[in-house]
Image: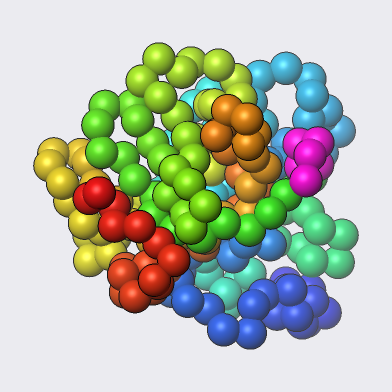
Amino acid sequence: MALRSLVLLAALLPATLAYAATDDIPEVLQGRWVDKGESCESGGRAMAISATTLVYSDGTISDVFFAPEDSAIRIREEATNYEYVADDDTLLFHPQGFGMGSSFPMIRCAEPAGQMGRRCGWQANLSPGEWRLVDADRSWILSTQDDDNATTLAVMDMVPDFDAGQFVSTGTYYGYGCVCMTVATDTTLGRITAIASSQRLPLATCEVDPSLPSIAD
């Protein structure tokens, strides 16, 4: 990784990281990516990178973390990684790891049309298929039990997981954590229609925020 790329990446990252986990994928690297030369709108899903996961175009999910020493997104328990090149805002896919075999460039897809805004609050999954972002304004729908459309799938590809220590369990598989998201919304339907990036926050951040309702209410 060129020194200039590392300097550029450092300039793009927030001055203070408030992640619940220090190896979350930086927001500047999150989003949808495709192989260089392919169209982001060619059909199917692009590869989606959230704060904690990489969702391939076929829906397969891998847990990932950020390795700042290599400016790379790494897949846990594997050599496979995606090196970020800040000079031209691309990812280099190394299937066998750095310096092993071929590498393949990937380009970033543009965000969906519509104004993006920052919303912070509780990311909650309290019943089967029901996902919400509860902020100071309202409870926004991320997904409902019967959703199976492309827009909702793309939203859920970008929803991060939480570490056990920063997650309140309300039963098997269910619970909530604290998050900030850059999103597009449909205020008429009360839905989040796209997620550009997210940042996991410590539970205490939401717990002490007087503007947020209790998630149990």
Is residue 163 inside the magenta stretch? no
Residue 62 coordinates in the image, percent (x, y): 43, 42
Q: Which residue appears at 66% of the width and 19% of the height?
A: 44
- For the magenta stretch, what is the residue range? 110-115
Depicted 2 relative to depicted 103: above or below: below
Depicted 125 relative to depicted 30: above or below: above
Q: Which residue appears at 53% of the width and 26% of the height?
A: 153
> Residue 155: which quarter of the image?
top right
Residue closer to the observer: 145 or 85: 145
Depicted 183 relative to depicted 112: above or below: below
Residue 52 seen in the figure? no
> Residue 144: which quarter of the image?
top left
Residue 113 seen in the figure? yes
Q: Which residue appears at 81% of the width and 58% of the height?
A: 89
Residue 188 coordinates in the image, percent (x, y): 63, 30
Q: Which residue appears at 86% of the width and 66% of the height?
A: 87
Q: What colour scheme governs how the chains and residues are painted in the rendered image of this protein?
A: rainbow
> Residue 167: which quarter of the image?
bottom left
Depicted 158 relative to depicted 23: above or below: above
Residue closer to the observer: 115 or 82: 115
Image mark count? 0
Magenta span: predominant SS is loop
Q: Is residue 82 left or right of residue 88?
A: left
* Quadrant occupied by the N terminus: bottom right
Residue 216 coordinates in the image, percent (x, y): 22, 50
Residue 163 coordinates in the image, percent (x, y): 29, 60
Q: Is residue 179 left or right of residue 50?
A: left
